[in-house]
Image (tube, helix red, strand yellow):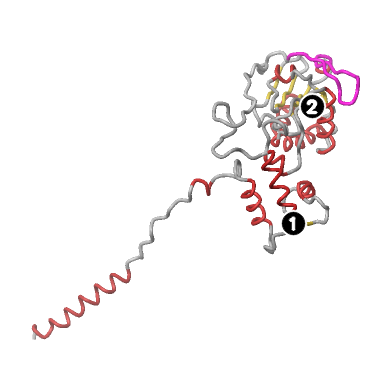
């Protein structure tokens, strides 16, 4: 009787082995992380590749033509790309944009930009000798944009606190921040004096070019005369609809240097002439939210 059970035992063991193997989860090949280049940002990317990615992202019907309705970015940027104003950016216009980016924004293969000592262009990283919080702000006298009238800082803060904003139109982070600063100005212009001091261009078209500026058609050469700096400030005022008073720094950038205001920076000066708040030294030196909070804290609001 026991001998007759052997075949059945063998069959049972075999079936059990098969079922176990089927139940085991299939092992997937190890996930290979994307190449570094796939994870990188568009900064430093070949102009043709940047435009290709932009088209792939926005061109909903994949016909190679970008329409105003398809483009979900800044409409002012679209207008600058749409050379003939027909509401479409076709292959010819894209090719023209690519050539402009190559001319003004492209870097040589292997060249790196961004920081001194690493090749390519260098940021304005001069020593920061700006006044510390609690110290008296350096006095200055500068002309108002389009006028012969001058403004002296100490006369302004003697009456009420002063908000200083340093910057230029070719600094992309500053353009975004300046619109926010205009909002702070509208909210607190009765409480504080606001002065926007126009300084040297952060990304002049004949200097360290920003590819983003080129794509948006922003091309301003570094100022060689006071009139050129005033003209650039006027462009900034009109394009960004700025209503706060604008002062023009001297061509030697004396005031901006005293305040470490290049490429951009914001300050709040109290009625005693002392620095209450100052932004970071660098491209993110203008933070409307921080300025607003500093004003409200000073005023006890």
Q: Which residue is mark 2?
A: 196
Q: Looking at the figure, which quarter contains the N terminus?
A: bottom left
| Residue at left offset 67%, top offset 62% | 62
Q: Is residue 61 visible?
A: yes
Q: Quadrant of residue 146?
A: top right
Residue 78 on the magenta span = no
Q: Where does the magenta region start and end? A: 138-155
The image shows residue 46 at horizontal and vertical percentages of 61, 45
Q: CA distance from mark 1 to mark 2?
A: 39 Å
Q: Secondary structure at mark 2?
A: strand
Question: Which comes sooner in the sequence, label 1 or label 2?
Answer: 1
Q: Is residue 301 visible?
A: no
The image shows residue 131 at horizontal and vertical percentages of 68, 16
Q: Secondary structure at mark 1?
A: loop
Q: Looking at the figure, which quarter contains the C terminus?
A: top right
Res 90 label: 1
The image shows residue 296 at horizontal and vertical percentages of 74, 29
Which label sits in the foreground, 1 or 2? 1
């Amino acid at each position: 009787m026991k001998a007759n059970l052997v075949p059945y035992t063998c069959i049972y063991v075999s079936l059990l082995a098969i079922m176990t193997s089927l139940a085991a989860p299939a092992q997937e090949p190890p996930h290979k992380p994307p190449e570094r280049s796939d994870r990188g940002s568009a900064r430093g990317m070949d102009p043709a590749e940047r435009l290709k990615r932009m088209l792939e992202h926005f061109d909903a019907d994949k016909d190679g033509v970008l329409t105003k309705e398809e483009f979900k970015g800044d409409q002012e940027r679209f207008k600058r790309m749409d050379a003939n104003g027909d509401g479409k950016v076709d292959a010819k216009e894209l090719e023209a944009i690519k050539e402009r980016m190559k001319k003004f924004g492209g870097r040589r293969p292997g060249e790196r930009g961004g920081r001194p000592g690493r090749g390519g262009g260098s940021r304005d990283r001069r020593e920061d000798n700006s006044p510390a919080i609690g110290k008296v702000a350096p006095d200055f006298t500068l002309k108002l944009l389009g006028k012969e009238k001058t403004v002296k800082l100490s006369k302004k803060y003697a009456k009420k606190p002063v908000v200083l904003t340093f910057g230029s139109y070719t600094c992309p982070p500053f353009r975004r921040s300046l619109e926010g600063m205009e909002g702070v100005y509208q909210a607190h212009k009765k409480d504080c004096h606001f002065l926007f001091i126009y300084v040297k261009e952060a990304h002049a078209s004949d200097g360290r070019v920003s590819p983003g500026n080129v794509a948006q058609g922003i091309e301003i050469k570094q100022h060689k005369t006071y009139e050129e700096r005033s003209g650039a400030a006027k462009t900034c005022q009109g394009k960004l609809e700025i209503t706060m008073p604008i002062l023009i720094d001297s061509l030697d950038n004396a005031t901006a240097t005293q305040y470490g205001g290049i490429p951009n920076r914001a300050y709040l000066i109290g009625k005693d002439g002392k620095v209450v708040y100052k932004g970071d030294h660098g491209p993110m030196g203008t933070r409307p939210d921080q300025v607003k909070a500093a004003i409200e804290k000073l005023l006890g609001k």
